[in-house]
């Protein structure tokens, strides 16, 4: 199974053989750094340049040839339409040339099933049902996973996502894009109790981060504009306090979801699950509650084709293939 991921600004290809990951190649795009965010047109052009060498490298690293492929899985959405079109079109073309079926994968579905990526037979995987906290730059969701094809979103953000809060607050501080990793690095040096930022009072299991961003901005302001001297002098403490607040918001909803569902296994996924504070908070919470935690390797938290190939493998076993007239979609949930 060849997997292709092109939903945003990473071009990735991976090969899974009988459920075992053989290769996972990722080409990142540095062109967006000077703009402080992903530029869709530049992203799609970079995918066009990268996809052939990335797929070729994935096949070579896996020790297989195109003729060995049984099927091709690709990310159909959600994501940037121009970027998705590159991966979708490439998958269709290669499928027709090789006379093998294609399997479409929901990007969010892939993040949940990243916990089933196995690099050898002994790698553990979650038992159903389990609760997955999916946190990224575009999504913050709590998902009850009953099996690979039965997932229910029981909580979601009503405005901004956790990763978006990290990146936008980092931008106000003058940090490079993407800002999340820089916040994580600085937080290790700061006092997380120095500043208090607003927390939402959203009923149920839904998230909100827009109020936090506003509170953070007002802390940095001197009358009508951001005070650069204040930011520079307090950057580690600001980062640590911001990270603590986001984690507290995430963990508060996760704790409530565990209590309401009664699950005994918790998993996390998405780009924000690479954050060291989030990883530690989830591990500590599960240890305290006596439940099992699944925290993916950092290589499988960001956008990658290993999760696409794995999700596609399960759909292939079930006989769920994609028609050639299928088009990508920009927005959708699990």
Image: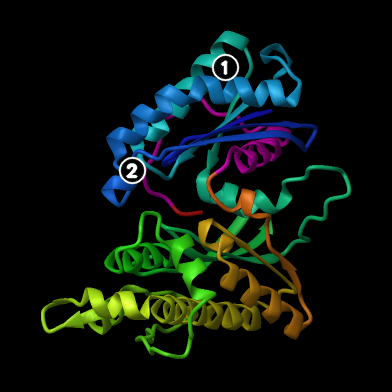
The x and y percentages for residue 103 are 59, 31
Residue that label 2 marks = 32
Which residues are drawn in magenta?
A: 304-332
Residue that label 1 marks = 95
The relative height of residue 4 versus residue 197 in the rendered view (above or below) is: above
Colour approach in the figure: rainbow
Please tell me which residue is depicted at 39% across the width and 79% down the height of the picture: 238
Quarter of the view holding residue 143: bottom right
What secondary structure is marked by label 1?
Answer: helix
- Is 51 a magenta residue? no
The x and y percentages for residue 67 are 70, 11
Foreground disc of the pair 2, 1: 2
Q: Quadrant of the N terminus?
A: top right
Please tell me which residue is depicted at 54% across the width and 50% down the height of the picture: 302
- Is 312 a magenta residue? yes
The answer to whether residue 71 of the structure is visible from this angle is no
The x and y percentages for residue 232 are 32, 74
The relative height of residue 295 versus residue 118 in the rendered view (above or below) is: below
């Amino acid at each position: 199974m060849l997997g292709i991921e092109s939903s945003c600004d990473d071009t990735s290809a991976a090969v899974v053989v009988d459920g075992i990951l053989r290769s996972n190649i990722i080409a990142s795009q540095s062109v967006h750094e000077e703009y402080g965010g992903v530029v869709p047109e530049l992203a799609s052009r970079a995918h066009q340049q990268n996809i052939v060498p990335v797929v070729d490298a994935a096949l070579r690293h896996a020790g297989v040839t195109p003729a060995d492929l049984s099927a091709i899985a690709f990310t159909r959405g959600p994501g940037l339409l121009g970027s998705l079109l590159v991966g979708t079109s490439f998958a269709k073309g290669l499928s027709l040339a090789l006379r093998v079926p294609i399997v479409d994968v929901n990007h969010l579905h892939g993040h949940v099933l990243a916990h089933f990526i196995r690099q050898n037979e002994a790698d553990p995987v979650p038992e159903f049902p389990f609760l997955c906290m999916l946190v990224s730059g575009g999504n913050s969701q709590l998902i009850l996973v009953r099996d690979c094809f039965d997932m229910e979103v029981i909580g979601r953000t009503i405005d901004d996502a956790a990763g978006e809060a990290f990146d936008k607050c980092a931008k106000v501080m003058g940090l490079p894009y993407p800002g999340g990793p820089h916040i994580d690095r600085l937080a290790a040096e700061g006092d997380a109790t120095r500043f208090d930022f607003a927390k939402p009072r959203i009923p149920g299991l839904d998230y909100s981060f827009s109020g936090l961003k506003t509170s953070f901005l007002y802390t940095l302001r001197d009358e009508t504009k951001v005070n650069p001297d204040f930011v520079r002098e307090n950057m580690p403490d600001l980062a640590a306090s911001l990270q603590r607040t986001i984690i507290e918001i995430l963990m508060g909803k996760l704790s409530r979801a565990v209590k309401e569902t009664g699950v005994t296994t918790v998993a996390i996924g998405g780009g924000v699950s690479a954050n060291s504070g989030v990883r530690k908070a989830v591990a500590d919470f599960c240890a305290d509650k006596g439940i099992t935690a699944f925290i993916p390797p950092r290589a499988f938290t960001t956008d990658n084709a290993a999760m696409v190939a794995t999700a596609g493998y399960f759909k292939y076993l079930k006989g769920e293939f994609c028609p050639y007239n299928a088009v990508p979609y920009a927005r959708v949930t699990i």
